[in-house]
Image (tube, helix red, strand yellow):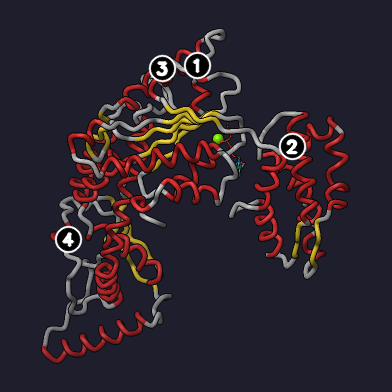
Amino acid sequence: MEPLENLTPKAIVAELDTYIIGQNKAKRAVAIALRNRTRRLRLPEEIRDEIAPKNILMIGPTGVGKTEIARRLAKLCSAPFIKVEATKYTEVGYVGRDVESMIRDLMAVGYSMVKTEMQENLQSEAEKRTEEALLDLLLPGMNKKKPTDQGATGFPFGKSPVSAQNETAKPPAITDGEGKTIEKDTREKFREMLKEGKLEERVIEVTVQKSGMPSFEVFAGSSNMEDLEMSMQNITNMITGGKSKRKQVPVGEARKIIMAEQLDRLVDHDKITEEARHRVEQMGIVFIDEIDKVANRSDRGGGQDVSREGVQRDILPIVEGSTVTTKYGVVDTSHILFIAAGAFNISRPSDLIPELQGRFPLRVELESLNAEDFKRILLEPKNALTRQYIALLSTENVTISFEDDAIQLMSELAAEVNSKMENIGARRLHTIMEMLLEEISFDADEHAGETINITTDYVNERLKDIVRDQDLSRYIL
Ligand SMILES: Nc1ncnc2c1ncn2[C@@H]1O[C@H](COP(=O)(O)OP(=O)(O)OP(=O)(O)O)[C@@H](O)[C@H]1O
Ligand SMILES: [Mg+2]
C-alpha cells in the first residue's frame, strides 16, 4: 500500500477503478477530497486552519457502488477511516448510540492504526523478550534474567492484559558456581530447541489478565462513560491487581500471548494517543452510509421522524467542527472529512434539514448501471463475480469458463429484469449468477476434473424462462 502522500487523485481513481466500474464523478470527488487533506497539511499553519474540508454527499440508486467506493477507499487509505450507518444512531437521550460515538470509534481506529505501526518497529525487541519469558516458563526456578521488568513499562496498574509470570511456587534456585553453568547450558540448550521449534507442543502455564468491562457499553448514551470506564478499570486494577487467570497452553500459543503483552508494554501509549489524535483530526474520514434513511419527508410526519431529525441535528455540530470527548482525550472534528451517501429513492436530499444539506456542499450523483456496465462488472474488477465462482469451483477441481457471448447475454438479462421489476443495480448480477450456476455448484463433486464451458445456450436454458416469466423472476431473481 502506498502512503497517502504519494497518492495523487489520478492514482486514487486508478486504484478505485480496479474494483468499481464507471462512477467517475464520484471517484474523482472522493479522490480530490482525499488529496486536499495532504495538500492542506503542506501549508503554513495560518492558512491550514482556515481550510475546512468540503464534505461530500453521494447520491445514487441502490446497488451502483456507493458503499463499495467507501469500502475500497478505506482499504487504500492510510488515513483513519470509518464507515457507519446513519440508521444505527439515535438522538441523544434515546436508547441507542449517540452520533458522537462515530468520532470515538474513529479515534479507536486511529489508535490501533498508529499502535500497529509503532509495534512493527518493536517487533524484534519484543521477540527477544518473549524468548526469555518462554525460557523462564520452561525452566522454572532457573537463574533468569528479567528483561520483562514491570517498572520499565509505564504501566503502574498492570493494565496490560497478559503477563507471563511464574514467580510463585518456584523451586529453590541452585546457587553455587557450578550449578550456575549447568543452568546456563540448559537454558541455552532450551533456547536452541525453542528456536528449532521442537518445544512448540510443550504445555506451560501463563497468566492471562482479564481486562475490559464490556457491560459499560450499555450506557453509551453519555459521552463521558468511556472515561468513566477507563478510571473504573484503573481503580479495579489497583485494588485487585487486575483479574488474572492461569492457563495451560502449548508453547506455540503462549508465544503469541506473551508477544502481544510484550508489544503492549514496549509501546509508549501516550505517544500513540498523541499521534493518533493528530492523524484523526487532520486526516480522519467518516463515511456515513444510508443518510437518506434519516431524512424526513415533510408530508409524512409521525413520531419516529422526530428522533430521526434529532439525529440530523446531532450530526450538525460534529460535521461543522466541535470537540468530542473520547477515552483518548478530546478530539476536534473541524478538519475531519465527512462523506455521506444514500439512495434517496423515497426521500430526497432536500428532505434533510437545511442546515445539514449546507454542510455537504459537494453533491455527486452516481449513475444507474446498464447492460454494458454489467458486462464489465462481471469481468473486470479484481473481485469480479466470474472470478469468484471460478475460484470457488476450482477448489473442487471443476474448471468453468465463461464464453464472451454468454457474459453478454447475462448482462442483458440482468438489465432486463432490473427494468421490468425493481432496479437493484449490480446486486442483480449476484442473483443471476447464483441461479445460473446453481446446478453446477450443487453437483460439483460429480464434475471433478471436468472443464465446463458456460455458453449462451447454457444461459438460455437456465435463465431465459425465469426472466421472461415475471411471476417466476419476482421470486427467484
Ligand atoms: N459500479 C460498480 N462496479 C463494480 N461493482 C459494483 C458497482 N456497483 C455495485 N457493484 C457491486 O454491487 C454490490 C452492491 O453495491 P453497493 O453496496 O456499493 O451498493 P450501494 O450503492 O451502496 O447501494 P445501497 O444504496 O443499496 O446501499 C456490491 O457487491 C458491489 O461490488
Ligand atoms: Mg450501500
Alpha carbon separation for disc pair 3 and 4: 48 Å
Mark 3: amino acid? Gly
Question: What numbered label is drawn on residue 307?
Answer: none
| Rendered view: 422 above or below 433 | above
Pointer 1: residues within 10 angstroms few (<14), some, or many (20+)? few
**Secondary structure category for the residue under label 3:** helix
Q: Nearer the viewer, mark 4 or mark 2?
A: 2
Q: Where is residue 87 shown, x and y percent of the image?
A: 49, 27
- On-image quarter of the C terminus: top right
Q: Which residue is mark 4?
A: 150
| Rendered view: 255 above or below 189 | above
Alpha carbon separation for disc pair 1 and 2: 29 Å
Q: Are marks 2 and 3 in contact (CB under 8 Å)?
A: no
Is 439 positioned to the left or the right of 271 in the image? right
Mark 1: amino acid? Ser
Q: Nearer the viewer, mark 3 or mark 1?
A: 1
